[in-house]
């Protein structure tokens, strides 16, 4: 696409919140809704994203804008469904499924994941079951319901970011720990990659998988930055 604006600037909205104006015209989402953000810091970052675009630009590369659009266009209309989907991820959470062999892999998983299962219990009164092997484990309905309550307390912007965090990390537990500021993002990334790293140590690294991991790590960073800015 061709750049069609000269200036991008954050501005307050009379009804509350902030938006970005392109040459003085407030932005709208792909669904033609006003692009309203909760924090000035986020609006300024989105404005900077637009200001940095070249003469020929690709909207898909504008990560903060994409998250902001999702928080306005999709999450409010599908909020109940998004919360239900994410709460149900408790049944397939990475940290619940341990290797039965080799012992060193199981030990590595336990060292990285057990502290966050304990944290989840203390912080949200959620008791997550753990199993070894590949057989599915059914979490108690109370566990899923409690997870839904935790998620329902989040803003639309937070849910938009959390959805990506959970999808990449494979763990609602790790994503919540990151969102609560308890778990550094890079530490969460390493915890989510224990199985992959074990395979790399054993068999070597595949170039295509390595490139995919680089992209996922970047996407994780974008989601975390959006989450942080939305609360600033």
Image: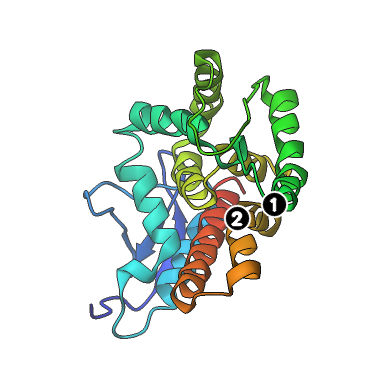
Check the image and tell me how it is coloured.
Answer: rainbow
In three-dimensional space, the C-alpha distance between marks 2 and 1, rounded to whole angstroms, equals: 8 Å
Specify few, some or many for label 2: CA neighbours under 10 Å numbering under 14, 14-19, or 20 or more. Answer: some
Query: Hey, which quadrant is residue 98 in on the image?
Result: top right
Please tell me whether residue 210 is drawn above or below residue 157 in the rendered image: below
Is disc 1 placed on a helix, strand or loop?
helix
The residue pinned by badge 1 equals 105
Which of labels 2 and 1 is toward the front? 1
Q: Nearer the viewer, residue 35 or 153?
A: 153
Front residue of this view, candidates 40 and 90: 90
Mark 1 is surrounded, within 10 Å at the Cα level, by few (under 14), some (14 to 19) or many (20 or more) other residues, namely: some
Question: Left or right of 37: which side holds 186?
Answer: right
Q: Position of residue 100 (x, y in %)?
A: 64, 41
Quarter the N terminus occupies? bottom left
Q: Residue at x 53, y 16 (%)?
A: 140
Which label's residue is closer to the chain start, 2 or 1? 1
- Quickly name the residue at label 2: 195
Residue at disc 2, secondary structure: helix
Q: Position of residue 42 (x, y in %)?
A: 52, 55
Question: How far across and down, in percent of the image, does residue 213 sit?
Answer: 51, 67
Contact (CB < 8 A) between labels 2 and 1?
Answer: yes
Instruction: Kindly identify which numbered label has been placed on residue 206.
Output: none
Q: Which residue occupies 60% across, 51% down? A: 228
Residue 149, horizontal then vertical, whole percent: 53, 21
């Amino acid at each position: 696409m061709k750049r069609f604006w000269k200036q991008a600037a954050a501005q307050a909205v009379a009804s509350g919140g902030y938006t970005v104006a392109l040459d003085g015209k407030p932005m709208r989402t792909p669904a033609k809704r006003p692009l309203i953000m909760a924090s000035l810091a986020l609006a300024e970052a989105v404005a900077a994203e637009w200001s940095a675009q070249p003469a020929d630009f690709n909207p898909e590369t504008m990560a903060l804008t994409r998250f902001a659009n999702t928080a306005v266009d999709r999450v409010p209309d599908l909020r109940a469904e998004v919360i239900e989907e994410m709460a149900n991820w408790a049944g397939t959470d990475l940290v619940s499924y341990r290797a039965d062999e080799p012992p060193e892999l199981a030990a590595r998983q336990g060292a990285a994941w057990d502290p966050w299962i304990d944290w989840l219990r203390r912080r949200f009164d959620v008791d997550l079951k753990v199993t070894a092997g590949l057989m599915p484990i059914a979490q108690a309905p109370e566990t899923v319901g409690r997870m839904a309550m935790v998620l329902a307390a989040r803003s639309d912007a937070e849910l938009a970011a959390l959805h990506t965090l959970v999808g990449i990390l494979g763990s609602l537990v790790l994503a919540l720990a990151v969102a609560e500021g308890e778990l550094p993002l890079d530490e969460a990334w390493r915890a989510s990659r224990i199985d992959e790293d074990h395979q790399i140590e054993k068999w070597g690294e595949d170039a295509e998988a390595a490139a995919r991991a680089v992209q996922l790590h970047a996407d994780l960073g974008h989601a975390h930055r959006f989450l942080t800015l939305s609360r600033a």
